[in-house]
Image: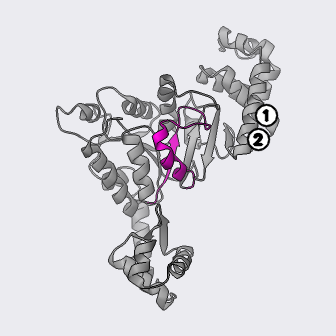
Amino acid sequence: MMEREEQIYTMALSRIAFYNPVQMLMLYKELGGAREVYEHREEIRDIVPDCSERLAELLKNWDAHIKRAEEEAKFDDERHIQILCYDDAGYPQRLKECDDAPLVLYYEGTADLNKAKVINIVGTRKVTLYGQDMIRKLCEDLRQLCPDVLIVSGLAYGVDIHAHRNALANGFETVGVLAHGLDDLYPPSHRATAMEMLSHGGLLTEYYTHTNADKMNFVRRNRVVAGMSDACVLVESAAKGGGLITAELALEYGRDVFAFPGRVGDAYSQGCNNLIRDNRAALLSSAEDLVKLMHWDGDIKLRKAKNEGIELNLFNDLSPEEMTLVSLLQKHNDLQLNVLTVQSGFPVAKVSSLMFQLEMKGIVKMLAGSMYHLLRR
């Protein structure tokens, strides 16, 4: 983590040049830090001739921006919000490949933003039952194939919220990229899901507190969704829309783009079908397609080989009571704590203790809603 002084100057610079992220990053890299930009603010165009005259003029006055950055940093410290500056190790490293990446991000959560596998799931706010089924099936099947994927979306209505909720239901960590500060939540109806995400993923934004969820903020945040991911999965989209913007940005950033096809003539399949028709997105029909096309199937084969090698000995060290619970999960996986209590006949406190021991041994994983998933069957 960088020193607080440099952090404050970086936050201030990000506000001064907020509407010119490309030039802001150019200055930051060229001079080696935000404090250096401040020190040379009067002769910035002599050092970096490509800096626009308007930005050079804006850079002459930092006082108000530094004061506001200090206030923001204090709020973040009190809320245990991480301030991720461009050169911090926790900053999404994939995003640094994009020439318009934010200089600072604000993050509340537990997930590693640099996980080995990161995808975003995006699409229309008017998701149909077909789209909901595609998201549900994708997450359910992906859990069996690649359970360590980080799923990113925008916490908006429609595809976004279904992506987050299905990710949680299947034990994935999921991060929502917001179009406002972390002192508020839009839409308010998604607050319960957002609170659950804080301990199974997180919330990420480039915006200060007291920033309204304006329309342009949603368009701007799409570049973060696209840039921090390995691949973009477009579920449903009209001919124009936010999900399609994210997919287009992903293509610009050199990311893989996948789209679920839809019925010809359906309004919210048009965007997906057009991308597939123009060879700008790979047709996606299953999680297996995604895993193969991303070349993640090597990990699956290795894991399967390891499983087969240890399967016979896996449960040898379990107590009879632990084995009873494992047997129940072998018959019907993903059972809630209360179901395991009834079916085993053990007291709820004992079941809770036994499941914790099994989790520590890497045999089960607790999903959202006190649901337990058997990792080895």
Q: Which SS class for mark 2? A: loop
Locate residue 41, reporting x and y percent: 78, 17
Residue at 65% of width from left, 20% of height from top?
A: 17
- Read off the magenta span: 171-199
Locate residue 250, reporting x and y percent: 43, 35
Answer with the quarter of the image where residue 57 lies.
top right
Q: Is residue 103 left or right of residue 242?
A: right
Q: In this figure, which residue is indicated by the disc labeled 1?
A: 6
Locate residue 252, reporting x and y percent: 44, 30
Answer with the quarter of the image where residue 260 lies.
top left
Locate residue 263, reporting x and y percent: 18, 38
Q: In this figure, which residue is indicated by the disc labeled 2?
A: 2
Q: Is residue 245 magenta?
A: no
User: Which numbered marker is on residue 207?
Assistant: none
Residue at 69% of width from left, 29% of height from top?
A: 29
Q: Amino acid at mark 1?
A: Glu
Q: Is residue 172 magenta?
A: yes
Residue at 65% of width from left, 14% of height from top?
A: 50
Q: Which SS class for mark 1? A: helix
Residue most toward the bottom?
320
Residue at 34% of width from left, 59% of height from top?
A: 141
Q: Nearer the viewer, residue 42 or 188?
A: 188
- Characterize the local packing of mark 1: few (<14), some (14-19) or many (20 or more) Cα atoms within 10 angstroms: some
- Residue 373 vs 132, above or below: the answer is below
Q: Is residue 33 visible?
A: no
